[in-house]
Image (spheres, rainbow, N blue to C red):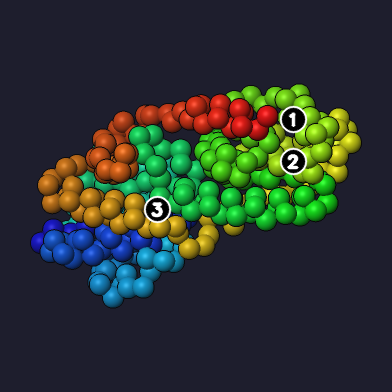
Amino acid sequence: MTRVALLTSGGDAPGMNAAIRAVVRSAIYQRVEAYGVYQGFEGLVSGHLNPMTLGSVADIIHRGGTILRTSRSAVFMNDEGRQQAYDHLEKMGIEHLVIIGGNGSLRGGYEFSRMGINVIGIPATIDNDIVYTQSIGFDSAVNTALEAINRIRDTATSHGRVFIIEVMGRDCGEIALHAGVAGGAESILIPEIAPDLNQVVDKINRGTERGKLHSIIVVAEGVYPVMDLKAEIEKRTGQDTRVSILGHTQRGGTPSAVDRIMASCMGKAAIDCIIENQRNVMMAYHEDKIHPIPLAEIVNGNKTPELDMFEIARMLSI
């Protein structure tokens, strides 16, 4: 009988459990034995695998995090560690591995596929920095950030303050861009475009001149030190400025409907690829359809920001 192992790796993202559920239930439907790997690649190296049943994935579609848990494994990144992982799978007669995770996880999977294991990737990262696809968790993270922006705007208006809101995203500005546009931010700073502090200050001053009671600035992490930005704004505008760092709140919580549906479709498609003998591909979600893309293209790709949306943000925040 065909056997598949599945794991979650790297940073957790809302919707991972929905993907786990879809993989396991689709596998059982197709008479494929499914095995869960606990704690990501670390569990693969140590051989921490258990059979998955319908009961294993009951009542998890709405839960954040991952029931399989996750970790970042240094040992898997060397040849000896990957050989140990391969030996565990070979001993159990498992030829297929579904990896649910972000860029680093997919790169690890690509290296592992060179040993003969068929690796199927499911993109799951709130950063949304994987090429050719929207990633599981991104929509939920944007909604979490947007809710925070809405709440902060209330207090910003009440006190007549400037608020700097830092969101996650690592080297990608997707969360900041989408949450900033949806939240009506006056300025959005993302790593893909050099920050223009003169423009930020000018917008605040113009707003003050026409009686605007608040300003919201959304900043992707790592673009500009937010406490330095606060000091610069206060110095050049005289406005009381506060900083709110949303941090890991964006990773947790109930996944959105979009993420649940996308995860369900990707999980089912991953098992379809195994049944159809497609090898070493990632499930890409584009234009409401799932497309299998070779892992080699994914790991060598570089996602570019939606500059059209940045232009929309610039125009609407005059």
Q: Are marks 3 and 1 in contact (CB under 8 Å)?
A: no
Q: Is residue 188 above or below residue 61?
A: above
Of the image marks 3 and 1, the number of the one nearer the N terminus: 1
Secondary element under disc 2, as helix, strand or loop, is: strand
Q: Quadrant of the N terminus?
A: bottom left
Residue 202 placed where, x, y %? 77, 26
Say which residue appears at 72% left-offset and 25% top-offset: 199
Does the rendering let one see residue 229? yes
Q: Quarter of the image containing the C terminus? A: top right
Badge 3 density bin: few <14, some 14–19, many ≥20, Cα 10 Å? some
Q: Quadrant of residue 310?
A: top right
Residue at label 3? Answer: 258
State which tag comes first along the sequence, 3 or 2. Answer: 2
Q: Quadrant of residue 281?
A: top left
Q: Badges 3 and 2: C-beta atoms under 8 Å apart?
A: no
Q: Is residue 317 left or right of residue 239?
A: left
Q: Which mark is residue 203?
A: 1
